Amino acid sequence: MRVSVIGCGYLGAVHAAAMAELGHEVVGIDVDERKIAALAAGEAPFFEPGLGAILRSATGSGRLRFSTGMADAADARVHFIAVGTPQSANGYAADVSYVDAAFDALVPYLADGALVVGKSTVPVGTAARLAARLAETAPHARLAWNPEFLREGFAVKDTLEPDRLVYGVDDPESTRLLDQVYRAAVEAGAPRIETDYATAELVKVAANAFLATKISFINAMAEIAEVSGADVTKLADAIGHDARIGRRFLNAGVGFGGGCLPKDIRAFTARAEELGRGESVAFLKEVDAINLRRRRRVVELALELLGGSVYGRTVAVLGLAFKPDSDDVRDSPALDVAVQLRGLGARVIATDPEAIANAQARHPQLDYTTSLDHALTGADLVVLVTEWHAFRALDPTETARHVTARRIIDARNVLDPTAWRAAGWTYRGLGRP
Ligand SMILES: NC(=O)C1=CN([C@@H]2O[C@H](COP(=O)(O)OP(=O)(O)OC[C@H]3O[C@@H](n4cnc5c(N)ncnc54)[C@H](O)[C@@H]3O)[C@@H](O)[C@H]2O)C=CC1
Ligand SMILES: O=C(O)[C@H]1O[C@H](OP(=O)(O)OP(=O)(O)OC[C@H]2O[C@@H](n3ccc(=O)[nH]c3=O)[C@H](O)[C@@H]2O)[C@H](O)[C@@H](O)[C@@H]1O
């Protein structure tokens, strides 16, 4: 099948390469010339395990091309729209202008029987609005909404082996085309939910809202654990054994960030308010507030451990990406903590295996180093904020050789407090004694 993917960011680049890996003839389109040049050369423009390999093999075989010109999408039968839907500059709502722009630019090139497939996460009602526009401007084409559930760090596997497929469609031909695109997953037995546009759009934001709520729930328990001397990690293990609750996404710590969960819960709240049902998801404001409090809590702990002021003190910040195995720093709790500490006058020296370039572009005022040893050297305080393997594996005795004082905040609760305290460290987790 000939497929186009419009928008080649964290979602679209992986989707394009994975579609080619599945045997489709793919063209990836983006307005960002640098990104397209890198992708066309078979280079992943961001860090995502496994992406480079499938990109090189697909561009090498000629099944995958990239272009900045929408005309190159003209011979595709199925067009995926995977452009960004960031938080608006002036509020909580999603900015859907990139979706509209990509859609409008694509319409003149739609062949007879073409299917436009929305993958971007959008406010409910967007697909119906675009379908009405399509009926007027290109009645020979169809629209489907097919939300994406991939996780960064596992994006290639999640795309090739999705745990479910959701088709928001309004005719059987769209389903037939989507089944052809996803034949491998359908034949492997991936559950497939065929539904209307509104449900498909809501499934996506509901899933992210649930995940965010689960994380904030456990972080709320961490707040209570902090004032009662309880251990939130043991609490999570214990409640997680109940299969109805489940242990996944119950890791308390500095909270969630990234290009999706934070903006998606805010956009959902804004859309519900527009629809006159703000009260139905008002709890998401609390989910957001709990999440942001965790970042402040890490800063408070730093102040506490350094005797009330971080001014002039050297703080080693381990981690900048919003989670391990990603270079994404969008709404990263780690970067936020680093910036807050710097704002209070600390000499922050930050390190991350992959995210330094992205962090530096946003916050040039911080000091960065690619060397973990260098980051630790002379530190008055170490703050572990993103649980990369290299940081989880730190040895307390070896680490002590580099620092000025043995103080550590484990903002992801991934270290063994007993081992660190035994090696002479003042250890503080989030919600564990
Ligand atoms: N990053 C992720 O893990 C996931 C993202 N999503 C959703 O997918 C969408 C895209 O997210 P990301 O890939 O993370 O964003 P991103 O910001 O990495 O990529 C968006 C891309 O769209 C391009 N673009 C903007 N306007 C364009 C236009 N008119 N024509 C062609 N290209 C255009 C940009 O240059 C950029 O490369 C969002 O709605 C997001 O919520 C959904 C599931 C997972
Ligand atoms: O819509 C999206 O873009 C994607 O958003 C999330 O994926 P992602 O943002 O890549 O990362 P997650 O693994 O969900 O982690 C999100 C944040 O929550 C934090 N987290 C996660 C789990 C946990 O127990 N505790 C916790 O604080 C992570 O550190 C990270 O900052 C969802 O998991 C995907 O299903 C969805 O497709």
Image: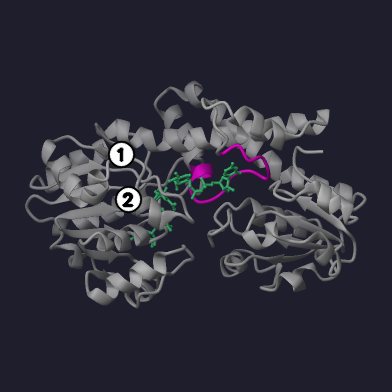
Q: How far across and how far down the image is residue 114, in percent?
A: 13, 51
Q: What secondary structure is found at the residue carrying circle 1?
A: helix
Identity of the amino acid at label 2? Val
| Residue at 55% over, 32% down | 213
Horizontal arrangement in the rendering, residue 207 relative to residue 295 (left or right) = left
Residue 308 shows up from this direction: yes
Q: How far across and how far down the image is residue 160, in percent?
A: 33, 53
Query: Is the shortest distance between ligand 1 and the CB of mark 2 under 8 Å?
Result: yes
Q: How far across and how far down the image is residue 382, in percent?
A: 79, 59
> Would you place residue 13 above or below residue 221 in this image?
below
| Residue that carries the numbered disc 2 in the rendered image | 99
Q: Most prominent secondary structure in the magenta stretch?
A: loop
Span highlighted in magenta in the image: 249-263
Residue 31, image quadrant: bottom left
Residue closest to the eye, 185 or 99: 185
The answer to whether the residue labelled 1 contacts the one labelled 2, judged by CB atoms less than 8 Å apart, is yes
Q: What secondary structure is found at the residue carrying circle 2?
A: helix
| Residue at 20% over, 46% down | 178
| Residue at 70% over, 45% down | 295
Q: How many marks?
A: 2
Residue closest to the eye, 371 or 341: 371
Magenta-colored stretch includes residue 253:
yes
Q: Earlier in the sequence, mark 1 or mark 2?
A: 2
Residue 286 shows up from this direction: no
| Residue that carries the numbered disc 1 in the rendered image | 126
Q: How far across and how far down the image is residue 399, in percent?
A: 81, 65
Residue 217, image quadrant: top right
| Residue at 18% over, 66% down | 71
